[in-house]
């Protein structure tokens, strides 16, 4: 069942914000999470504030950042799912660690989307990012909760808000 759920999530992860200018303003892609168990490095508050200021009210930059963040999360999510599958036959501690990592990465992605929504002035973009953040958080690392049609709909809403549909 997990492998089937994994295949269901691929269209959502591959979709992201389709197309777009990878060189748009908005700073570096945030580390949403990686495949290692290490905790992410602390972010200097002044650097974060400068990044927020650069994005604030800039629809094009926020869309570019949302695309990069979604792509990064897609890669992380696939790695996390692989880790869960690999750890399924291991002891309870390994299973728990894999699940906790997936939960943490999903939460980080949801928080990143919500933070971008707070910076958006464009009502459609703010709504799309907020809706996407809420829908992602509902997953809480349980890939069986993914509804490919709804996730595609959310992605389409973000694409439309970013002028890509």
Image (tube, grey):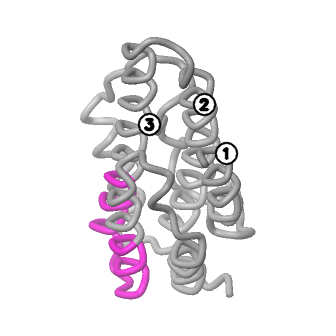
Mark 1 or 3, nearer chain start: 1
The residue tagged with tag 2: helix, strand or loop?
helix
Q: Position of residue 88 (x, y in %)?
A: 54, 25
Q: Nearer the viewer, residue 58 or 83?
A: 83
Number of the front mark, 1 or 3: 1
The residue tagged with tag 3: helix, strand or loop?
helix
Mark 1–mark 2 contact, CB under 8 Å? yes
Residue of label 1? 3
Q: Position of residue 86 (x, y in %)?
A: 62, 23
Q: Is residue 7 left or right of residue 139?
A: right
Residue of label 3? 102
Q: From mark 1 to mark 3, how far is it between C-alphas? A: 16 Å
Q: From mark 3 to mark 2, how far is it between C-alphas? A: 12 Å
Mark 1 or 2, nearer chain start: 1
Q: Main secondary structure of the magenta part?
A: helix
Quarter occupied by residue 56 = bottom left
Number of the front mark, 3 or 2: 2
Q: Residue at x 36, y 55 (%)?
A: 110
Mark 3–mark 2 contact, CB under 8 Å? no
Q: Position of residue 54 (x, y in %)?
A: 41, 56
């Amino acid at each position: 069942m997990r492998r089937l759920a994994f295949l269901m999530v691929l269209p959502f992860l591959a979709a992201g914000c389709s197309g777009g200018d990878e060189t748009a303003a908005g700073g570096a892609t945030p580390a949403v999470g990686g495949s290692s168990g290490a905790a992410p490095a602390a972010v200097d508050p002044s650097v974060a504030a400068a990044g927020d200021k650069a994005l604030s009210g800039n629809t094009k930059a926020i869309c570019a950042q949302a695309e990069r963040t979604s792509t990064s999360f897609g890669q992380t999510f696939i790695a996390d799912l692989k880790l869960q599958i690999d750890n399924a036959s291991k002891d309870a501690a390994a299973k728990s660690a894999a699940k906790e990592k997936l939960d943490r990465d999903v939460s980080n992605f949801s928080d990143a989307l919500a933070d971008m929504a707070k910076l958006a002035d464009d009502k459609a973009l703010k709504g799309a990012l907020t809706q996407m953040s809420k829908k992602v958080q509902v997953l809480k690392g349980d890939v069986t909760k993914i509804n490919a049609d709804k996730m595609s709909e959310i992605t389409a809403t973000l694409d439309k808000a970013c002028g890509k549909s």
